Image: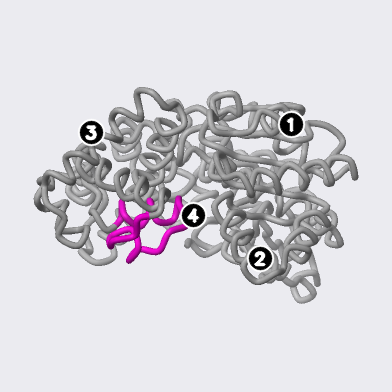
Amino acid sequence: MNSPADIWAKVLSLMEADMTATAINTWFDDCTAVALEEDRFIIHSPTNFKRDIIEKRYLPTIQKALFELFACEFKVEVLGEGELESFTVKPQDTSFLPGTEDYTFDRFVVGSSNKFAHAAALAVAEHPAHSYNPLFIYGESGLGKTHLLYAIAHKIHAAHPDFRVVYIKGDNFTNELVQAIREGRNQEFREKFRSADVFLMDDVQFIAGRESSQEEMFHTFNTLYEAGRQIVFTADRPPKEMMRLDDRLKTRFEWGLPVDIQPPDYETRVAIIKNKAIRRGMNLPDPVLRYIADNITSNVRQIEGTVNKILAFQELMGESVDVETVTRAVRDMFKEKAEFLPSSDVIIEEVCKFYNIENDALRGQGRTKDTALARQIAMYLIRRMTSLSLKEIGREFEGRDHTTVMHSIERVENLMKTNPEIAEIIKDLNANINARYE
């Protein structure tokens, strides 16, 4: 991350386009940067006279330069005589959703593809449960849904520290429910979610088709909604396209406001890349920005991974950042999805997680109905998503012969044609597996 002094040097350089050198030298020659916080930039001028002039004449120019650097708005605060000593940087609340501090509205780059979702999320964060309840944000993986969910959480927590904000992923909701049932802690489980002031669930599609989870969600939703608590969901598709989701939940999820996020357009991708690079301490040349934006077109998460890899390449190899260097550093990140082959272990792990089955049981001789079907689906997915032969797939399941594998694959193919629920399960599993490689 660039230091405040480094950022101030870049700001002054950008301000040269709007100010004369004499004006900059007169008012900013002894001005120093103090801190860059989440949504404000603090500078210090040694005299109150200069401080007042900067505040009256030049704040918009400074804010414009900061926007050019970070592609987001910053407040600018100017300290005067005697104020530097008393200034302290606001400590971050590390006890609330630790590790997600960067997922705020200020660091979300808004473009035409996500403007509506961003506005709806901000409205919910500013006035919880006043409108858009529930808010349902949907779109493909890696487009910023989770970022908006955390941004809502952080903004509400900052304004209402006494609110109970509960965040959970859909698959963890199911896992916690299963554990609570096993240990006889059903009431404790219900209290955890039904007493929330703000309930946020990421990837709600994972509860679809799970009878107990859907039943619990139905009553949790009703309790929270009737109590006037804010509810926000994210998913990879709208409720009406979740074939295995109970109709009563589909209806409730659509009561408020469903909004989608689309892949970012070119201008938004450039802004995202520039923002993430600056925050990691890099000022990427325009040709490099354009090269990355031209090659990564659909996934914000992959853009962030690209910037991280460029930074690592620069630090380890000590090379300047140009198009040729970037091409070599991130060549593999521009491959088509089809070139990424998941391992059989990853596929089996995701199937086990989906069906809540132990790995040994799936690979072994378990003959319950659910285990047998899950095993056949795992064989089908390994055949479709890897280059393993039928014989090699059989070895993954305690040496089953290739004819057993072939019959399992054929059965799943037939079920997909006649049973929409199985087809939906395969779609969900494909998405979960592919997400591991994004």
Q: Which residue carries the number 4 mark? A: 279
Q: Residue 421: x and y, percent? A: 46, 31
Distance in Å between CA atoms under marks 1 and 4: 40 Å
Foreground mark, 2 or 1? 2
Main SS class of the magenta portion in the image: helix
* Residue occupying image coordinates x 22% and y 38%: 384
* Residue occupying image coordinates x 16% and y 51%: 393
Foreground mark, 1 or 3? 3
Q: Is residue 366 magenta?
A: yes
Foreground mark, 1 or 4? 1
Apparent side of residue 222 relative to residue 348 in the rendered image (left or right): right
Q: Residue 221: x and y, percent? A: 77, 43
Mark 3 vs 2, N-terminal side? 2
Distance in Å between CA atoms under marks 2 and 1: 25 Å
> What amino acid is labelled 1 in the image?
Arg
Q: Is mark 2 on a helix, strand or loop?
A: helix
Q: Which residue carries the number 2 mark? A: 180
Q: Which residue carries the number 1 mark? A: 252
Q: What range is drawn magenta here?
A: 346-367
Q: What element carries label 1?
A: helix
